[in-house]
Amino acid sequence: MRLAITGGTGLVGRFLVEEALSAGDSVTILSRRAPPPGVFSAPVAHQHYDLTGSVPDLSGCDALVHAAFSHVPGRYRGGEGDDSEGFLRANLQGSLRLFATARRAGLSRLLFLSSRAAYGEGWPPGARLVETMAPRPGTLYGKVKLEAEQALAAMATPEFGTASLRVTGVYGPAGPGRTHKWTELFEGFAGGEQVTPRVATEVHGADLAAAVRLLLAAERDSLGDGGLFNVSDILLDRHDLLAEVARITGATSPLPEPSDAARVNVMDTAKIEALGWRPGGMDRLRAALPEMIAG
């Protein structure tokens, strides 16, 4: 498969690229800067692309995964900072321009990395979030993701299969020279800082990449009309996460109090699991932690 990936040099995109390379795909990364040598396990092509600019020629590609997102560093919700108009121009208008170009170029499949933020807040405590629920995003980030999902779904045809993955928080080892999402948390814990209790849903980047692979390879009918697919794995309490870190490192810092997991709205993943997706659960987390701690 000749696959184009936007955001392929990011923390999440790196997993998508590596999975595609391991499957034997020819990968073209669309990004502002070419990836440095040695970042990936095999060579990739590169085309300059900025969400605010024109879309490069995609006619040589079979499929596209859109994972790029412009935001204030380290923030997604609230990632617009003081520039809501610029945020919309890049992430919504830029995405719509990309989708339209891909369809005109004759690609057979386009996948969009959306977010559980499209569901919004205010659901009853403990309610499971399923793809058929009417979304009610309360942040600009969630609204942009939702509107992009809807626009992409409207473009689907029998020849142009589309799908959006509503993804929870993604964890995993960072690439060379990068820090992962829990770097500051682990450093603060090791230094004896008091850690705020928190519980959230997570998925390993490699499991997300496996979900993307399934949807790239799935029969067109399996996608529905621009279908939505929840991608989430474990419900993780910082108490339990840092207990694992302490077990590995021997740290004696005090653990945060457990949070009320019963109040968390977990995304139901039966739809993507019906296609054969099986995430790694806590075993995958435990396997990833030594490298994340060392890194």
Image (cartoon, rainbow, N blue to C red):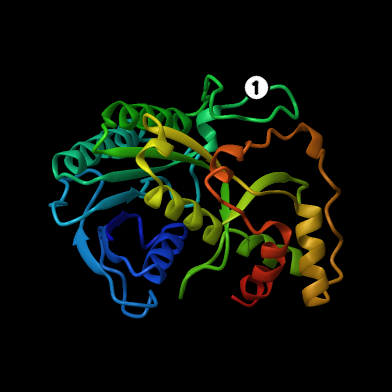
Residue at the spot 39% in from the left edge and 38% down from the top edge: 163
Q: Position of residue 184 (x, y in %)?
A: 63, 62
Q: Position of residue 95 (x, y in %)?
A: 28, 39
Q: In which image quadrant can residue 3 be found?
A: bottom left
Which of the two residues, 100 or 225, is positioned nearer the viewer here? 225
Q: In which image quadrant can residue 60 be found?
A: bottom left
Q: Which amino acid type corresponds to the residue marked 1 in the rendered image? A: Gly
The image quadrant where one finds the N terminus is: bottom left
Looking at the image, residue 105 sits to the left or right of residue 23; the answer is: left
The image quadrant where one finds the C terminus is: bottom right
Looking at the image, residue 244 sits to the left or right of residue 154; the answer is: right
Residue at the spot 76% in from the left edge and 48% down from the top edge: 196
Which of the two residues, 110 or 85, is positioned nearer the viewer here? 110
Residue at the spot 61% in from the left edge and 64% down from the top edge: 183
Looking at the image, residue 100 sits to the left or right of residue 209; the answer is: left
Q: Position of residue 162 (x, y in %)?
A: 34, 38
Figure check: 268 above or below 276: above
Which of the two residues, 248 or 194, is positioned nearer the viewer here? 248
Residue at the spot 75% in from the left edge and 69% down from the top edge: 190
Q: Position of residue 77 (x, y in %)?
A: 51, 38
Per the image, the residue denoted by label 1 is 122
Looking at the image, residue 12 sits to the left or right of residue 266; the answer is: left
